[in-house]
Structures are given as structure tokens and as C-alpha cells.
Image: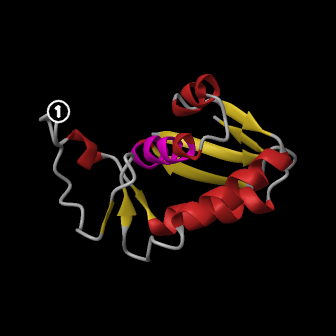
């Protein structure tokens, strides 16, 4: 389960994110402050669209915000904290620990950034 992110003009160009990655990615996008909250609420539910210009702006903003500090093998949680601690695949039920279930890996984010910057817009479904 998760979302597919398609190029608006070429639906054969696609990238997939699982639910945990996507939730964290949307919260990172939200922290950039470049799109309104209602739009990002829909995006977090797996629905959304960005023009080519918006997709490129998103890719550049994520690149500037994340890649200077996030290294290969690390992952970022929705609150922006970075860890290199391996995922132990534990489902954390305590409210204070649930954030540990959601993260986006460096490699996923780099692939998403490249996809955004090279796309003709994004269609999320």
C-alpha cells in the first residue's frame, strides 16, 4: 500500500512510496511552507497534483532543505529528526513513540527530488 506519483504528461514515468515514506514526505513538504495546508491534507491522503513549475520548486526546496544534512543510510521522521539507527520493524503503540514508525529514507528522498525536478508535473494517486 502507498501512493504512486506519476509524471503529469507521461504516466509511464512513475515512482512509488509506501505509506510510511509518504506520510513523512508530506510532513517534510508541509514544513517547507510553500503549499497551503488543505492541499497537503489531500496529498497526505494520497491525492494531489502539481504543475511542472510547482514540482521543480518542490524538488529544489527539498534538496536545499534536506540533502545538506541527510546522508546515505539515514532516515528522517515527520518532525524532521534524522537518525542512522536501523529500523527494528517494531510497531510502536505508545503515543510518544509512534513517530518512530514513520520515516523517509535518504535514498527515497533523493529519488523523489530527482523525479520532481525532471517531471512535467506530478499526479499523486
SS for callout 1: loop
Image quarter where the N terminus lies is: top left
Tell me which corner region of the image, top left, top right, bottom left or bottom right, holds residue 110: bottom right
- Measuring from the top left, give residue 57's x and y in whole percent: 75, 53
Q: Which residue is mark 1?
A: 95
The residue sitting at 46% across, 72% down in the picture is: 69
Q: Is residue 87 above or below residue 45?
A: below
The residue sitting at 63% across, 34% down in the picture is: 125
Q: Residue furthest left?
A: 94
The residue sitting at 84% across, 49% down in the picture is: 53
Q: Is residue 91 above or below residue 61?
A: above
Q: Which residues are magenta?
A: 20-29
Q: Residue furthest front?
A: 33
Asked whether, in this view, residue 87 is left or right of residue 56, the answer is left
Asked whether, in this view, residue 80 is left or right of residue 46, the answer is left
Q: Residues within 10 Å of mark 1 (few under 14, many from 20)?
A: few
Q: Residue furthest top?
A: 38
- Residue 121 visible at all: no
Residue nearest the viewer, comparing 66 with 94: 66
Residue nearest the viewer, comparing 122 with 40: 40
Q: Is residue 25 above or below residue 83?
A: above
Secondary structure mostly taken by the magenta-highlighted segment of the chain: helix
Q: Is residue 24 magenta?
A: yes
Amino acid at each position: 500500500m502507498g501512493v504512486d506519483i506519476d509524471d503529469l504528461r507521461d504516466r509511464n514515468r512513475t515512482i512509488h512510496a509506501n505509506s510510511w515514506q509518504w506520510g513523512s514526505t508530506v510532513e517534510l513538504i508541509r514544513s517547507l511552507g510553500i503549499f497551503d495546508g488543505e492541499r497537503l491534507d489531500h496529498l497526505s491522503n494520497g491525492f494531489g497534483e502539481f504543475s511542472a513549475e510547482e514540482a521543480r520548486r518542490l524538488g529544489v526546496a527539498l534538496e536545499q532543505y534536506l540533502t545538506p544534512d541527510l546522508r546515505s543510510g539515514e532516515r528522517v521522521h515527520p518532525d524532521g529528526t534524522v537518525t542512522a539507527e536501523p529500523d527494528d520493524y517494531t510497531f510502536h503503540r505508545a503515543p510518544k513513540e509512534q513517530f518512530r514508525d514513520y520515516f523517509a529514507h535518504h535514498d527515497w528522498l533523493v529519488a523523489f527530488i530527482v523525479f520532481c525536478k525532471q517531471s512535467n508535473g506530478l499526479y499523486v494517486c
